Image: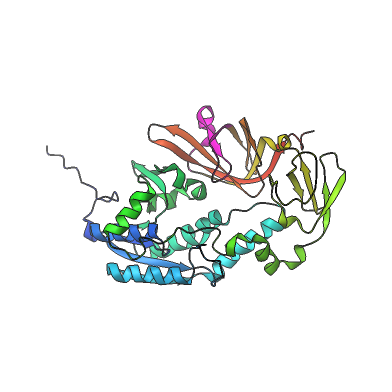
Amino acid sequence: MNISVKKTNSLGFSKPIKDTKVVVAMSGGVDSSTVAGLMKSEGYSVVGVTLKLYDDVKSTKGNRQCCAGQDILDAKRVAQQLNIEHKILYYQKKFKKDVIDSFVDSYVAGETPIPCVQCNQTVKFRDLYSYAKELKADALVTGHYVSRIQTNGKADMYRAADIKRDQSYFLFSTTQKQLNFLRFPLGNIEKKETRNMAFKLNLNVANKPDSQDICFVPNGDYASVIKKYRPQSFKEGDILNTSGKVIGKHEGIINYTIGQRKGIGISYKEPLYVIDINALENKVIVGKKEALTIKKIFLKNINLLSDVEKYNDNLLIKVRSTGRLIKAKVNLNKIGAEVNLMEDEIGVSPGQACVFYSKDKFGDKVLGGGWITKTVNKYLST
């Protein structure tokens, strides 16, 4: 008996490349433009889609933000250069509701939000995913630096080969259904190689600077965004030490984040750090650096790609995008999860994400994650 094995194309489909339709999310930057160029050069049927998420904001020279007016023009020009179909989706209202409003509310509540995660979770991997399905695409392809390995029809997510560019932290809320549909061609290469590819493809964005800051926050000025949408949140309040003594005044809790050292405005014999923010009482608590040490984290809105508790003997977590992997153990409960850190970490803030990883033969596997609601440190536990 002859057994024929179907060969798969570079995206893992058992069909001719020319019959494989892909939607490429094109932000106008070098990464997504290179991905579109790669898909076109390999012979896939490519549709480029660009999201207009907000009205243009002013920024100083040298700062770059994604999804602005110039970026939409750049994406359109790349699509014309590659001779691929290009569509623009006007998602400003969705973005305002799901990302900007959530960002502002989180800051007013004394948290440190991560709008990039919410953007991926909502308008990109929820709404754009649905649109790609409507176009009857076989896959949604993006320029994110994250690795994807598929076995027996199920996809797993791993940290990118270029750890400095890895974006898995921002994608922890990706569902299994979405991950099975997504493709990340840049996951196994370094950024410099991406630029080299862009030059070889003769793309007009090959020299374009990378995006910086949060797209709707001009020049990293968070306070100006909060003032625009919630001017009443700038209320004067007390700054307390860890003993509860008032040692100063603040002009609004939105000017502070957990772990902050500069800009507190209090002279002291030793450096002071923001230890806690009490939004209900409009108070900022400051103390010595050692009071920032976290031992336990509580999470809500958990998204799991694997049964995380089964990995507790080989579990690592990440509590900030640029942070290190930390040994921990996770216990799930009805409202979320309790995470016990096996190593010290400082300056963890509610509103940020805690992402679960486990090492195996392929690398650092993403197991899921959740949103931090509360931390227990030396100050809070005494």
Asked which quadrant contains residue 346, the reply is top right
Q: Is residue 138 above or below residue 231?
A: above
Q: Position of residue 296 (x, y in %)?
A: 67, 35
Image colouring: rainbow
**Numbered disc total:** 0
Quadrant in the picture for the C terminus: top right
Residues 282 and 29: in front is 29
Quadrant in the picture for the N terminus: top left
Q: Which residues are magenta?
A: 305-328
Asked which quadrant contains residue 3, the reply is top left
Residue in view at x 58 percent, y 31 percent: 329
Residue in view at x 51 percent, y 50 percent: 170
Q: Position of residue 142 (x, y in %)?
A: 39, 56
Would residue 135 be visible to someone looking at this image? Answer: no
Q: Position of residue 368 (x, y in %)?
A: 51, 43
Reply yes or no: does residue 51 show up in magenta. no
